Image (cartoon, helix red, strand yellow):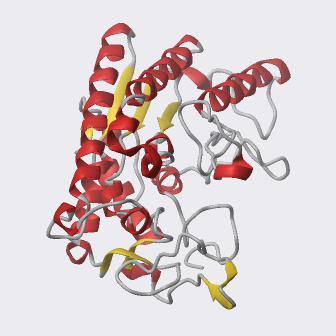
Amino acid sequence: MTYFKKPVGRATDGRVVVDFLAQALGLPFLSPYLQSIGSNFSHGANFATLASTVLLPNTSVFVSGISPFSLAIQFNQMNEFRELVFELGTQDTLPSKHIFGKALYTLDIGQNDFTSNLAAIGIEGVKQYLPQVANQIAWTIKELYNIEGRTFMVFNLAPIGCYPAFLTQLPHNNSDLDEYGCMISYNNAVVDYNNLLKETLQQIQSELQNASVIYVDTHSVKLQLYQHPQDYGLKHGTKACCGSGGGAYNYNPQVFCGNNKNIKGINVTANACGDPQNYVSWDGIHATDAANKIIANAILNGSHFDPPFPLSHLCNLKPIG
């Protein structure tokens, strides 16, 4: 509703962060690898899917909604894509075979590993397999390195304790809420994982010659957005724009954004608000176009990279609209 004015396979009212990054680099939006018609991969490709995980899912998309396209599958698709580029040679919709060593590889994944079993097994249960998550990301970077990848940006996890969906669904006491209405224990657990991820990336950076493995701290930006939306020209932090039920969170786990359902004889519809530009949260989990733009600008200014990376010096960045 905000940018494309039609459904475009994004869980937001407009653009996602990688769209804004493409705009800043002066590139068209990335085509999804799974889009069979109308794709142009000459400037890059997007292997991400909604609700994907780092670890292989032990459930079906029909049961849990978790995507079957886990990180290992996405890497296999990337590898297959590269092999086809080498095999098919120069084509209008494919990149040069020389691009793979010069490309920027971004990984923004892991939230679903963290949250999908959280209600069932709790924070301590989830913490048992988080080292596997960080290690799988590291393994993927090493595999990409082996096929010429040299520049990697890995986004850390968001403060899910501020998400309307989890504030509604996860067990907590009022004593676990901070002054901004976010769940302290869950946010602390995310910070623990982010520290683990950062250490893991520092370790593989030391192992990979001539590579840049950059930890991108989008967590701190998102935390500020949820806790101080007014500082960024927004109004609502922990309330979803597209949902149902009103109240503090406007989120009903039985009726996701855009859907309608008959609940106890009453037809309930999860509609979008009329002013998504005032919200951080689009649907209780994913961010709005307005919030994604703020997050992208924070990435582009380079202050959230560890180690520092001179993106603005290496690239002629354009202002994002």
What is the x, y in percent for residue 18? 51, 51
Answer above or below: position of 8 versus 160: below
Q: Does the rendering let one see residue 76?
A: yes
What is the x, y in percent for residue 150? 46, 20
183 lies left or right of 311: left
- Quadrant position of the C terminus in the picture: bottom left
- Quadrant position of the N terminus in the picture: bottom right
Answer above or below: position of 180 versus 214: below
* Quarter assignment of residue 235: bottom left
How many numbered marks appear? 0
In this orientation, which residue lies closer to the viewer: 99 or 81? 81
Residue at 69% over, 80% down? 261
108 lies left or right of 239: right
What is the x, y in percent for residue 204? 36, 15
96 lies left or right of 303: right
In this orientation, which residue lies closer to the viewer: 81 or 311? 81
Q: Does the rendering let one see residue 314?
A: no
Residue at 75% over, 35% down? 94
What is the x, y in percent for residue 252? 52, 75
Residue at 81% over, 23% down? 89
203 lies left or right of 14: left
